[in-house]
Image (cartoon, rainbow, N blue to C red):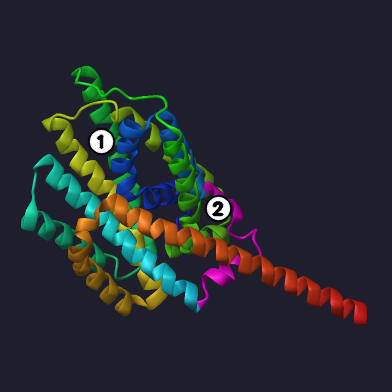
């Protein structure tokens, strides 16, 4: 347990780091460059609100945690964790190839090795280790983002022409991603683990601080998307993507341990890491949209079931009172 007054900030950092995903950096910049500022603001706002909204509603919707922890839903959330691993592995791999740092089999081998080592490291005391792992990683991430942005500003790199608004289809796309993003924390077992811990310690407000930290992160993403990267910026960017991807992938591995137990969870993590080789061609965006579109419908079903159970219970209770 983090007993210091700054403990809540470590939790907030871990929540923000776990929510970031390698996609948020790469996809965020692509959205800004190809779909315009308005689309990015919609997407970035939804991204920043997702964790605070989860913190607010998690225990206010009756029976929701009970439904999420039911066996059929935990099967689905395990699949979500597998997709999470794949997406973040693809994010690192794509950055290595795009920057020319590594490519082909060497790049794949490095990504697999990193993930396997991390899975072994998280085998014991998984949740606590992710919190202590995320705090320094996310601190390094912010520092590198700031250094990269300052370098871009003062070296006068070439800039992209960023449009304020492109077309209605992009706005509709952004609104659809809002549903995907809001459903995300609800389908993350790691988020529920953290919520249980924060509730027991009276620090649920850490979710709101996580949202503020994510706003800062989104501002960095938007600012960097203006500049065309040179070799030095690409080197910085590789490390930034690694920080973001690892701080999310570790939560997926810990989530598998929570659902399946430590040994089976580790085995599924290793199997998922190796199976990533099959899904590489789908790409970051393809994997994210496939998983996200499934996730939003399952979340909607869970909320409907949870509220239905609540209404049925109220109806039964009122019936008993009336009979008496």
Residue at the far bottom: name it.
Answer: 324
Q: Quadrant of the C terminus?
A: bottom right
Q: Quadrant of the N terminus?
A: bottom left
Residue 65 visible, this orientation: yes
Q: In the rendered image of this protein, does residue 261 appear above or below residue 200?
A: below
Label 2 crowd (10 A; few <14 / some 14-19 / many >=20):
many
Q: In the rendered image of this protein, does residue 230 appear above or below residue 122?
A: above
Residue drawn at the location 15% of the way across and 62% of the way down? 113
Residue drawn at the location 49% of the way across and 43% of the way down? 175
> Element type at marker 1?
helix
What's the mark number on residue 92?
A: none
Tell me residue 292's x, y (percent). Answer: 41, 56
Queried whether the magenta region covers residue 53, the answer comes back as yes
Tell me residue 17's x, y (percent). Answer: 37, 49
Label 1 crowd (10 A; few <14 / some 14-19 / many >=20):
some
Q: Which residue is mark 2?
A: 55
Queried whether the magenta region covers residue 61, the answer comes back as yes
Task: Answer with mark 2 or mark 1, whichever residue precedes in sequence.
Answer: 2
Q: Is residue 109 left or right of residue 15?
A: left
Foreground pick, 269 / 309: 309
Residue drawn at the location 42% of the way across and 68% of the way down? 77
> Element type at marker 2?
helix
Q: Which residues are magenta?
A: 52-70
Residue drawn at the location 25% of the way across and 45% of the way down? 241
Tell me residue 272's x, y (percent). Answer: 25, 69
Q: Is residue 112 left or right of residue 153?
A: left
Q: Which residue is mark 1?
A: 144
Residue 203 visible, this orientation: no
Q: In the rendered image of this protein, does residue 159 appear above or below residue 250?
A: above
Tell me residue 125's x, y (percent). Answer: 35, 68
How far, Cα to Cα, is label 2 from label 1?
Answer: 28 Å
């Amino acid at each position: 347990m983090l007993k210091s007054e700054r403990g809540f900030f470590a939790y907030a950092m871990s929540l923000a780091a776990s929510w970031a995903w390698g996609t948020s950096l790469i996809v965020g910049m692509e959205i800004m460059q190809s779909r315009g500022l308005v689309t990015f603001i919609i997407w970035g706002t939804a991204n920043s609100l997702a964790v605070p909204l989860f913190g607010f509603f998690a225990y206010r919707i009756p029976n929701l945690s009970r439904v999420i922890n039911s066996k059929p839903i935990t099967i689905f959330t395990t699949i979500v964790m597998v997709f999470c691993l794949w997406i973040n592995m693809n994010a690192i791999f794509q950055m290595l190839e795009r920057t020319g740092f590594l490519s082909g089999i060497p790049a794949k081998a490095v990504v697999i090795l990193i993930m396997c080592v991390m899975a072994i490291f998280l085998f014991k005391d998984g949740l606590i280790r992710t919190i202590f792992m995320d705090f320094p990683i996310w601190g390094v991430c912010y520092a590198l983002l700031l250094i990269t942005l300052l370098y871009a500003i003062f070296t006068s790199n070439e800039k992209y022409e960023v449009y304020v608004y492109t077309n209605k289809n992009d706005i509709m796309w952004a609104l659809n991603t809002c549903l995907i993003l809001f459903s995300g924390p609800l389908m993350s077992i790691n988020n529920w683990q953290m919520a249980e811990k924060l509730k027991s310690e009276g620090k649920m407000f850490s979710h709101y601080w996580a949202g503020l930290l994510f706003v800062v992160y989104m501002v960095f993403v938007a600012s960097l998307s203006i500049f065309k990267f040179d070799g030095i910026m690409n080197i910085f960017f590789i490390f930034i993507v690694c920080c973001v991807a690892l701080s999310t992938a570790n939560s997926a591995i810990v989530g598998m341990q929570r659902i399946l137990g430590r040994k089976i969870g580790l085995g599924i993590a290793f199997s998922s890491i190796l199976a990533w080789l099959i899904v590489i061609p789908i790409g970051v965006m393809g994997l994210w949209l496939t998983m996200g579109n499934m996730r939003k419908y399952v979340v909607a079903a869970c909320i409907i079931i949870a509220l239905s159970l609540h209404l049925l219970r109220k109806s039964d209770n009122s019936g008993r009172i009336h009979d008496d």
